[in-house]
Amino acid sequence: MISDLFTTTVLIGILTSGIRLATPYLFASIGEMFGQRSGIFNLGVEGMMLMGAFAAFYVTLTYGNPWLGLLAAIIVGGVMGLAMAVISVTFQAEQGISGIGVYLFGLGMSDLLFQKLLGSVETVRGFRPMNFPFLAEIPVIGPFLFAITQQSILVYIAYALVPIAWYILYRTTLGLKIRAVGENPAAADALGVSVPRTRYVTVTLGGVLAGVAGASLSISLLNVFQQNLTSGLGFIAVALVYFGGWRPYGVLFGALLFSMVNALQLWIQALNIPIPGDASELLIMMPYVLTIIVLIFSAGRMRKPSALGTPYERGS
Amino acid sequence: MLDFFAKHPRFGQLLDLSLPLLATLAALGVGAIMLQLLGANPVSAYSALLNGAFGSRNALADTIVRATPLLLVALGICIAFRGGVINIGGEGQLVVGAILGTLVGLWFPEAPGIVIIPVALVAGFVGGAVWGGIPGLLKAYYNVNEILSTIMLNIIAVQGMNYLLRGPMIDPVQLQAASRIPQTARLAQAFDLPRLVPTRLHLGALLAVILAFAVYIFLWRTTTGYRIRAVGLNPDASRYAGINVKRNIVLALLLSGAFAGLAGAVQVYGVHHRMFTDGSLAGFTGSAGFNGIVAALFGKLNPIGAIPASFIFGALIVGANSLQRAMQVPAALITALNGLVVVFVVSSDIFSRRLARNRQLGVEPSSAPPVEPSLSPALSVEGEGPQ
């Protein structure tokens, strides 16, 4: 019954799930945001996530330590990010298309490695949710706080990333350079900012965070790896950057909104609440339709970094 | 070295045209290294690939059959990219076209094939046009980035397909047998696309090639095609010249989707004779929506060039399955290889542009051939906002 949905337990469950589900989006979108702020449109996030997810999973499985897995994801993501930087900055390749190429490469490579090194789907002991029993003692809201804070450390790191990203972008010289390079690379160049170097930094960072996003799936949220684990998540993450107006807190809002809707849909299915016409797929569609709707309303008002997608060459 | 090409324009043009090929060879070189690391001898691997794709009459037929949807999608991509829009929605548009096309066959099972086949193909064309038109409208009138909207629509399309094939469109036979495999009934035999030779090669392949020439004529010999290309090259100048930029953006995406939709219908009527799904997008499409983009790029966004390009990629895909069977190298290698090809081809474009610039700088204007626009001016990540 649909009224089942409105019990406290379920609502808390949806909230907890929503917070948790936002994690990969936060990692990937914040990373992409830095890249886009500097003017580079990286559509290959999905491929980087898949490779990061596999690397984290495989290393965690082999060595039994999820932190090593996380390190592996950082390295793999960083390498792919660096490659994307070379493609977009040095070779000035068409960014949307090269992103698709990186995606296809990551998709195929991760699947290939999965088949050759693992062969079958299995689970891993990844990052476990953390518990804060003392929270339950707090009157009234105690149990609620206790429930929603039962998340793995990666979830906490993802949320901590938002104010950190804000600080970097708006309170450091690096952030200033990034924003300048994304708005007017020629002017930044004239003032002595190295446009290529700044972009290399942001795109590589984006790769690292994409790899970590993948890891958050394979060794934290799902604790499994299979072909095409991310299933479009990386592309959604790119959309969320637009959604959030290229601002860290905007991205947070977008990621939470999307994930809450997703969590709602998952819980509806889990509770076997009957849907008219048995159209569970229509529920699955919900977050994506919502994204389009928000894009419609936000695209007019948001200002994208002016140099986004345009390669820069001195003298051009 | 670039001086040499500046003084000898013909060689420059040759390099220009062969850059995708050279880039692909480079990618295949990397592939050989990957094969070696996998413990497979690259030479035997690539021979198995070639054999699988061309080794027999059936293999060749399979290659062409595989290439057909790629070519159709690629034609749409040529129109889109030339029009300055990046259509990543080929997968979804293909699915929507396939659904509409299948519906025609399911609703009129007794009708003569000669009527239903064209109607169904047109239905596929229309279905894809709608699915491409939506992002077109969103971009033109709401400034929504078409890369994002087309990707979203891909996911929405696959969910819609899963719902329909599990529910309203499911094969009644499945319901009786209570097996619930998400697929439709097999369409009437009369609706099968006629075979060209006694193999799996069907009429759709010929149709695709004919359409390639039609699209070429459309883009370069008609006013509408000219307008689409103008908007793609320079929206501001086009607007100043009186061309309705918004309408042409919509048109470019709409036509692009239409060809992908047609590909979907062709796949249903020529190959599968029903619709089915495994839950994911690529289960039905075979990633033709993405691979079509690769083929279009490889053909330098020229519809005629897309013919050999699709053929080669069709061969890669067919050969990949052969490779998997013969040498236990997973077909996923080919997906990764495809990705490498895209990256290499798109990266090599910088040489084209440098060459073109040096040609213009170093040679007398009268003897310099017109510069073929490379990919960059035609595309931008963002559409032009409403002014």
Image (cartoon, coloured by chain):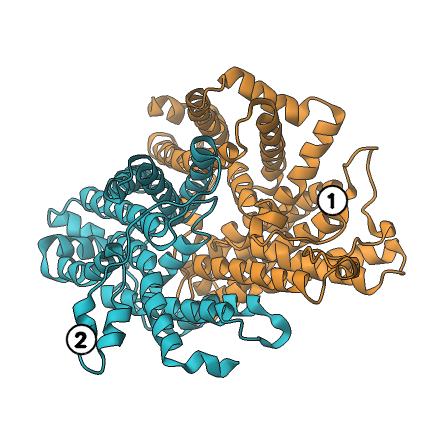
- Relative horizontal placement of residue A8, taking residue A271 as reference (left or right): left
Colour for chain A in the figure: cyan
Q: Which mark is residue B271?
A: 1
Q: Residues within 10 Å of mark 1 (few under 14, many from 20)?
A: some
Q: Secondary structure at mark 2?
A: helix
All told, the count of numbered labels is: 2
> In the figure, residue B327 lies in which quadrant?
top right
Please state the horizontal and vertical placement of residue B201, each as a whole percent of the image.
76, 37
Q: Which mark is residue A137?
A: 2
Q: Is label 2 or label 1 in front?
A: 2
Please report the residue visible at 28 percent of the width from the left and 69 percent of the height from the top: A148
Amino acid type at circle 2 is Glu
Q: Is residue B304 above or below residue A292?
A: above
Q: Is residue B248 above or below residue B187?
A: below
Q: Is residue A178 above or below residue B39?
A: below
Chain hosting mark 2: A
Q: Which chain is orange?
A: B
Cα separation, mark 2 vs mark 1, equals 65 Å
Please state the horizontal and vertical placement of residue A184, each as a whole percent of the image.
22, 55
Q: From the viewer's side, name the closer residue of B386 and B3.
A: B386
Are dots 2 and 1 on a single chain? no
Please report the residue visible at 38 percent of the width from the left and 71 percent of the height from the top: A14
